[in-house]
């Protein structure tokens, strides 16, 4: 569960960095049309789309981990 979250975090971080660079190019008046950042954005978007089904399958486990991290292990024992 945690390694999946780390991968997803890094993918999203990389996507945000690349989209920020894309907007920087656009705002400076340069055409990003043939820039490699476009290929990188497409690649990252495809990866994010591919992990979406896995994200939905792991939703319960991720929510459980978040609940444990927020409330502590004693709350998990009291729910059982």
Image (cartoon, helix red, strand yellow):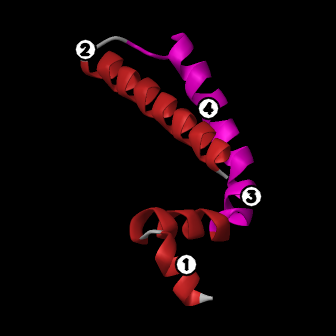
Q: Which residues are magenta?
A: 31-59
Picture quarter with the C terminus: bottom right
- Label located before the other in sequence (1 or 3): 3
Q: Which mark is residue 76?
A: 1
How far, Cα to Cα, is label 2 from label 3? 37 Å
Where is residue 62 shown, x and y percent of the image?
A: 60, 62
Q: Secondary structure at mark 1?
A: helix
Question: Looking at the image, is 24 positioned above or below residue 34?
Answer: below
Q: Secondary structure at mark 4?
A: helix
Q: Which mark is residue 28?
A: 2
Where is residue 18 shown, x and y percent of the image?
A: 45, 24
Q: Which residue is mark 3?
A: 53
Could you say which quadrant of the image residue 39 lies in? top right
How far, Cα to Cα, is label 3 from label 4? 16 Å
- Asked whether disc 4 touches disc 2, contact meaning CB atoms under 8 Å apart, the reply is no
Taking depth in this image into account, of 5 and 12 the one nearest to the observer is 5
Asked whether 58 falls inside the magenta stretch, the response is yes
Residue ID at (69%, 64%): 56
Crowding near pointer 3: few (<14 within 10 Å), some, many (20+)?
few
């Amino acid at each position: 569960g945690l390694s999946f979250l780390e991968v997803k975090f890094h993918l999203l971080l990389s996507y945000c960095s690349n989209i920020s660079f894309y907007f920087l190019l656009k705002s400076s008046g340069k055409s990003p049309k043939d820039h490699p950042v476009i290929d990188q954005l497409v690649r990252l978007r495809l990866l994010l789309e591919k992990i979406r089904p896995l994200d939905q399958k792991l939703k319960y486990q991720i929510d459980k981990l978040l609940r444990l991290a927020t409330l502590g292990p004693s709350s998990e024992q009291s729910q059982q």
